[in-house]
Image (cartoon, rainbow, N blue to C red):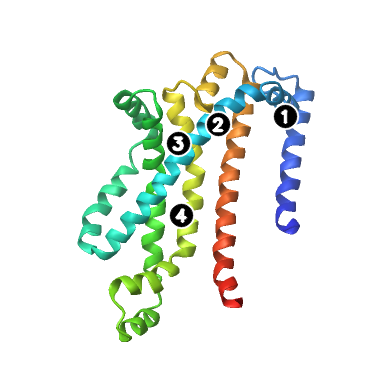
Amino acid sequence: MLQRTLPTLVLTACLLGGWEIYCRQSGVSPLILPAPTEVISALIRERSEIGRHAVSTLSVAALGFSLSVSFAVLTSILLHFKPWLRRGLMPLFVTSQTIPLVALAPLMILWFGFGMLPKVLLVVLVTFFPILLSLLSGYRQTPPAFRDLLASMGAGRWTIFRRATLPSARAAFLAGLRISATYAIVATIFAEYAGARRGLGIYILTAKNNFRADLVLSAVVVSATLTLALLGLIRLLDWLSARGPEARGNA
């Protein structure tokens, strides 16, 4: 574990150290580029306010991501059993990913107001497709011999799917979760930036309008931390799901 994380920690420390030295030696204004120590100090001073906005962002991202995963799983099962429906809907799903967030977020706010709904919908739209695509790709990785063996034993389509196809998609599904998780917090913040009453997005917008680069970067640090925490939960899910079959086998 340490061998894997040590290069990242060393590189991060070098980048932060170079950043700090540059800010101290170049005389650049903190209004333009605050030093890392100034960013941390601002984060500590404003921890209560930033924390309040971070909770709002996290709640929206978690709800949107959960709905996205549920919708993607159900849709993937439907498209797997109905190939004609997959051929008809996949071009529409692909087209939905070409719509820029900068145009979509204001429209969501305009149509659904400043509440939670438009932000949740935006998170779902952004994170749904990678999960769906990874599941459909994982279903195709089912070993034909395993599928044929179950069919020769009289297993139906649903039994084959549950026993062979679904377990074969585990790795692809988790990869799709990791990709979508990196988008969930960003999509929420972008929606808040377009229009919201609270959240890291509106906090960043307010700090930017007040020329507080230190507060903007503090919110960025919190956003990155939330994303890493979400990725950590997915890694934990990966570990638990991998141990499940082993534990049953040992029992």
Kindly identify which residue carries mark 1.
36
Q: Nearer the viewer, residue 32 or 159?
A: 159
At mark 3, the secondary structure is: helix
- 1 or 4: mark nearer the eye: 4
- 2 or 1: mark nearer the eye: 2
Residue 159 % position (x, y): 34, 73
> Residue 121: which quarter of the image?
top left
Residue 165 % position (x, y): 38, 70
Query: Considering only order in the chain, which callout, 4 or 3, is on the residue closer to the N terminus?
Result: 4
Quadrant position of the N terminus in the picture: bottom right
Q: Residue at 41% of width from left, 50% of height from top?
A: 69
Query: Considering only order in the chain, which callout, 1 or 3, is on the residue closer to the N terminus?
Result: 1
- Give the residue type at disc 4: Gly
Query: Considering only order in the chain, which callout, 4 or 1, is on the residue closer to the N terminus?
Result: 1
- Give the residue type at disc 1: Pro
Label 1 to label 4: alpha-carbon separation: 33 Å
Vertical side of 38 occupied by 221: above or below? below
Kindly identify which residue carries mark 2.
55
- Give the residue type at disc 3: Ala
- Give the residue type at disc 2: Val
